Image (cartoon, rainbow, N blue to C red):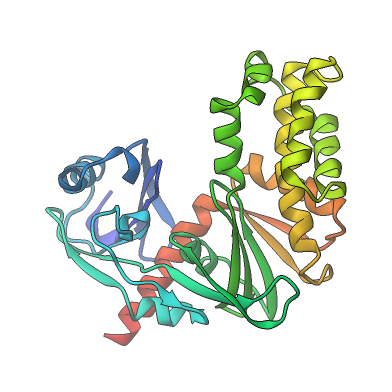
Amino acid sequence: MSTNSSALIGVDWGTTRLRVFQIGIDGQILDRRASPCGVAQLRAGDFDRVLRDIVAGWPSGLPMLMCGMIGSRQGWREVPYRPCPAGAKDLANTLGPIETSYGPAWIVGGVSTLHDQNAFGERGGRKIYDVMRGEETQIAGVASVGQTLMITPGTHSKWTLVQADTIESFRTYMTGEIYAVLQKHSILGRLMHDGIGGQFDEASFLDGVHWGVEEPALLHSLFSVRTQGLFEQKTPAALVHYMSGILIGSEVSAEARRQRLDCPVIVIGSTQLTSLYQIALAACGFRDVRPVEAEGAVAEGLWRLWQLRVATL
C-alpha cells in the first residue's frame, strides 16, 4: 500500500485486545490487524515494542491516533477524562501526545460523568463517578440526530445518552465481567462446564431475560442457574445462555425504568452481542433499535476525531 493513499494509523487498544487500522485519505480502512496483547497483558516497557511489531511494514511517517485503555493509569500514558457534556470537538481538542518509535502519536482521553442523584432520582444524593475509555470514540464514529441512547455492551456495558454528537451522561454495568467471573470461578460455572461453546439456545436466553426482568433481586435470580441445573430443568448448554439472559435482562430492565422507550437506540458491538441485546431490548419494550458493528465504529471515530483535530491546527 502506498504512503500517498494512507492518512492515519488508528489504534484501538483495550484491556484484552489490540486492533490497528490503516486508514486512507477518504476515511476508508485500507488494512487492519489484531493482537491479543491488550493492556492487561503488558508491562510498562512493552507498549512501544508491541506497537512497532503490529504496524511493521505499514507506511511510516503517518500520524497515529490511539484510544481505549492505553490512555488509562494502567496504560502507556494516562490522559485525563473529559467531564460531561463532552462533544467530539472537545475530545479532539484534548488529545494527549506521546512519542513512539513509529513516530509522534496522540491518545484520546476518556469521558467521565458524575451522578448526584439518590435512589429516588432526587438531586443532592450520593456523588458517584462513571468513566469510559474507548466507547467515546465508538460513539464519535456513529452518526446520530437529536437525542439517541447508545449502548456499548461488553465487559463493562455503557448506556450513553447522546445529543447530536455530545455525550450528555452515561451509566456503566459490569455485566460482561460478572458473567466471566461466574462462569469461570463460581459453583454456577461447574454446572455449565460441558455446555460452554455450544450452539446458541435462544429460548433459554429469553427465559433468563424474563427472569432477570421479573425478579429485581439479581443475587437471588442468579441462584436459579444452580437449581435449574440441579433439578435438570436445563442442560449444561442451556444454562450458559440462561445465565447470560438473566444478567443482560437485569441490566436492560434497570435502564428501561429510567429511559424513554421511544428514544432511538443504537447498540454498538460485535454481531453476537448486538443480537443478544436486541432480543433483550425488545423483551423490555424498546422498539427503535439499530445495531452497529464496533470495529467499524471505532475506526470511523478515530478518523473523525483526527479530522477535527487537523481542522484546529
Q: Is residue 24 above or below residue 32?
A: below
Query: Which is more toward the observer, 184 or 19?
Result: 184
Q: In this view, does 304 lie above or below 177?
A: below
Q: Residue furthest left?
A: 101
How far across and down, in percent of the image, does residue 73 sit?
Answer: 30, 58
Tell me where residue 245 sits by quadrant. Answer: top right
Direction from residue 109 to residue 251 in the image, left or right: right
- Residue 287 seen from this side: yes
Tell me where residue 72 sits by quadrant. Answer: bottom left
Direction from residue 293 to residue 98 in the image, left or right: left
Tell me where residue 134 sits by quadrant. Answer: bottom left
How far across and down, in percent of the image, does residue 165 sit?
Answer: 56, 78
How far across and down, in percent of the image, does residue 291 sit?
Answer: 68, 54
Query: Which is more toward the observer, 135 or 208?
Result: 208
How far across and down, in percent of the image, does residue 32 sit?
Answer: 38, 45
Q: Which residue shows up at 61% across the image and 65% down it? A: 171
Q: Which residue shows up at 60% across the image and 28% down it? A: 183
- Residue 276 seen from this side: no
Q: Is residue 124 above or below residue 188?
A: below
In which quadrant will I find the C terminus?
Answer: bottom left
Direction from residue 67 to residue 100 in the image, left or right: left
Q: Which residue shows up at 32% across the image and 46% down it? A: 39
Direction from residue 265 to residue 150 in the image, left or right: left
Query: Which is more toward the observer, 163 or 126?
Result: 126
Q: Which residue shows up at 47% across the image and 72% down it? A: 112
